[in-house]
Amino acid sequence: MFTKQELKEFCDNARLNYLDHISIDCVIFGFHEGQLKVLVLKVKGEDAWYLPGGFVLKKEPLDTAANRILKDRTGLDKIFLQQFHVFGDPDRSRPHNEMYRDLIPPEENWFSHRFLTIGYYALVDFVHANPTPDSHSEMCAWRDLNDLPKLELDHGLILKTALDTLRLQLNYQPIGYNLMPKEFTMPELQKLYETILGQKLDRRNFQRRMLGFGILNRLDRPRKGGAHKAPYLYSFDLKNYQDALKEGLKGGW
Amino acid sequence: MFTKQELKEFCDNARLNYLDHISIDCVIFGFHEGQLKVLVLKVKGEDAWYLPGGFVLKKEPLDTAANRILKDRTGLDKIFLQQFHVFGDPDRSRPHNEMYRDLIPPEENWFSHRFLTIGYYALVDFVHANPTPDSHSEMCAWRDLNDLPKLELDHGLILKTALDTLRLQLNYQPIGYNLMPKEFTMPELQKLYETILGQKLDRRNFQRRMLGFGILNRLDRPRKGGAHKAPYLYSFDLKNYQDALKEGLKGGW
DNA sequence: TCAAAAGTGTTTTGGTTACACCCATGC
DNA sequence: GCATGGGTGTAACCAAAACACTTTTGA
């Protein structure tokens, strides 16, 4: 993965610029052709897959670091991105801790210690994202949630936790703005919800409920071209959407 | 706060045993006499108040560290304790970073760097907790949520975030087991909910709802001694309570 | 005997679920 | 013209909200 020389340079550079022992890993969700996708990276020359991740600059806020990582991997900016959990099992990074054991002494090796990683998840526009590998990856690609490669370290757990969080989120926050194109039809939006939840929803009730939130604008044009009756196009009412993000959509008690 | 000698020893010891740049802060909630309480510490000889906190041993899981801190400050163990957010603003620990600037050189000073802190919150039994100060505090005490001293650093924000999380939690998880005594009356439990939520609830609807969860056992004895009609005593049905913790109490969609 | 607290049941209502019919389009 | 997908309305149902009366107890 690294030659000795490359590793030395990387470690020296990292020690200088980044917070020790801390990483950020991002679960980046996209939606395309009725499927929920996750962005994953493949290491050069190995059959090893990871979530996009990175480190935190010494004077950088955590959210800024996560945004930087997201932007580096997708070209996208200013989108829904949220911290959801810290993963800190003492053994979680053991494979990495030992990876370069024989190449350079541990006190010079940036990877020789236990790492904590802060999990972020993001919802992004599949079409406008431009998956870009990082320096030690040969590939950055969307993978279907049902067709994921085995992920290294605890990245499988991180992904699962992100998905659970997203499903919970559905109950009290609007989602979709960053996952859907500017204009979309109600059945398309429904498909997104069904995919995230992994279950079918009633067409009519879904529509009523969504419209009830008041976060959608109906455009008075149908989607042309498809077979069958042309569905209306909608867009999000950004102002109300933002309000709903803050206020929550419903709220027990 | 520290003499030079004490500080040196502390730093050497800390560097040896703990993860750098990481702390844990705990928002420990208790409930007593109809008031929600939070455990806070007062620094020796200063009017400076903090949340209970500590560091993570090099090979210690995060949850274990949080439990250890909780046990050190309260004597309590195995209670509800949950990570809820990481606070990582680059300036959040600045006052501490600079505190000993002139006492020992920064490379020896454990506090000279930016710290990330992982926020945990706990719900504990007020009566059985035994507040115990740590080595640089002169006092560890319950303070009423409405009568809090100003907290140092971002501990005010940490507390507020914990409280928001707790209020959200009420909607989909049972709480109370760790906050209430073994036996309690329905009005007492209701008072807990009202206090956390900061609003009055209807007596009858509250009772119906609580009983509907199936997590309470009515003991066929009333609470004696008080004026007026004697209320029934209840206890939690621990098995069902645990199930409800896992399953959730209700759940949109 | 009366005020204050606690137990219980009923009505109302609003939201969710379930379901049926009509409309538009391409083949 | 018919199969398919999309739009809309309504009845049934359930859970939450609102609300009133009775019981117990100490002062």
Image: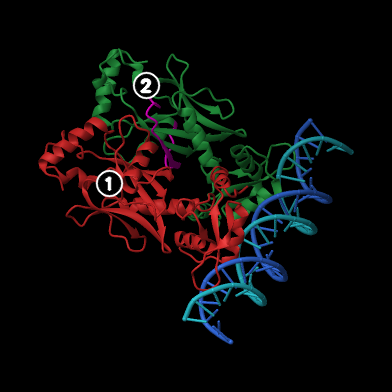
Chain colours: A red, B green, C cyan, D blue
Q: Secondary structure at mark 1?
A: loop
Q: Is residue A212 above or below residue D8?
A: above
Name the residue rendered at 31%, 36% in the picture. A56
Residue B191 x, y percent position in the rendering: 64, 39
Residue A75 x, y percent position in the rendering: 35, 46
Q: Is residue B183 left or right of residue A58?
A: right
Specify the segment rendered in magenta. B74-94
The chain carrying label 1 is A
Name the residue rendered at 49%, 28% in the picture. B156
Residue A53 x, y percent position in the rendering: 30, 45
Q: Can residue B176 be seen at all in this image of the molecule?
A: no
**Viewer-closest of B18 and A227:** A227
Residue B226 figure quarter = top right
**Residue that mark 2 sits on:** B96
Which numbered marker is on residue A92?
Answer: 1
**Viewer-closest of B27 and A171:** A171
Residue B6 figure quarter = top left
Crowd around label 2: few <14 · some 14–19 · many ≥20 (10 Å): some
Q: As shown in the figure, which amino acid type bears the numbered disc 2?
A: His
Q: Is residue C20 above or below residue A12?
A: below
Q: As shown in the figure, which amino acid type bears the numbered disc 1?
A: Arg
Is residue B54 highlighted in magenta? no
Distance of label 2 from label 1 (alpha carbons):
30 Å
